[in-house]
Image (cartoon, rainbow, N blue to C red):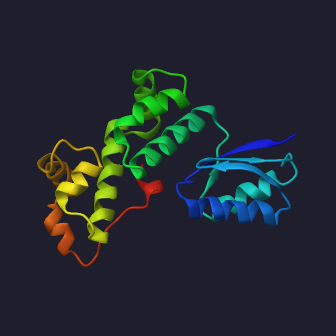
Amino acid sequence: MGQTLLIKNMVCARCKSTIIDLLESKGLDIDAIELGKIIVKQEVIEQYTAIKNELKDLGFELIEDESKMLIEKIKVVVIQCVSENNVNAVFSKISKEIDKNDSAISKLFSKSEGITLEKYIINLKIEKVKEYIQLNQLNFSEIAHNLNYNNSSHLAKQFKTVTGMSMSEYRKLQDWDRKELDQIV
């Protein structure tokens, strides 16, 4: 009999690796892992508090509240879609993951996080733009295309609105000022 643990701030492969190392050091066998969720083959009742505290020390959080679980699932789907340059699929993927309509999902997210889901998606996209600019592999039009913007002017306007500077100004900076994905909200 296994147990599913939902974990907040788990946003990348490195996060998965860190959590696997922690749980394996506790003698737990991992059955499956994906962003925001890990299934262990045994119950963790005796070690729960220790695992919870060690995860917190590493910047993660065990999620126990049902609405927080839903919010974390939403965030994981959005982060995956932005990372995969598949922003157009965000709402359909969220609807598949969470059996609620778009309006209910947006209201739940806004109420919990104090920011609209749309604004959260925009903020993630802007962080992805910053990453692309820092890597210096794509021009602004290619970045706009990858992130499903209609054109680079729309992206430029949104970038300036969010960051207060143009993408060209950002490119010239020495201090990149990027946010960690789990710190967007």
Q: Residue 144: x and y, percent?
A: 22, 51
Give above or below for 123 relative to 137. above
Residue 117 is drawn in which quadrant?
A: top left
Q: Residue at x 44, y 40 (%)?
A: 113
Residue 86 position, x and y percent, is 38, 43
Q: Is residue 34 left or right of residue 22?
A: left
The quadrant of the picture occupied by the N terminus is: top right
Residue 73: percent from the left, percent from the top? Answer: 55, 39
Look at 71% across and 60% down and name the residue there.
20
Quadrant of the image occupied by residue 72:
top right
Taking depth in this image into account, of 66 and 99 the one nearest to the observer is: 99
Tell whether 14 sits left or right of 181: right
Residue at figure coordinates x 49%, y 38% from the top left: 74
* Res. 67 in view: yes
Residue 21 position (above or below residue 184): below
Instruction: Answer whether residue 116 is visible to the viewer in this image.
Output: no
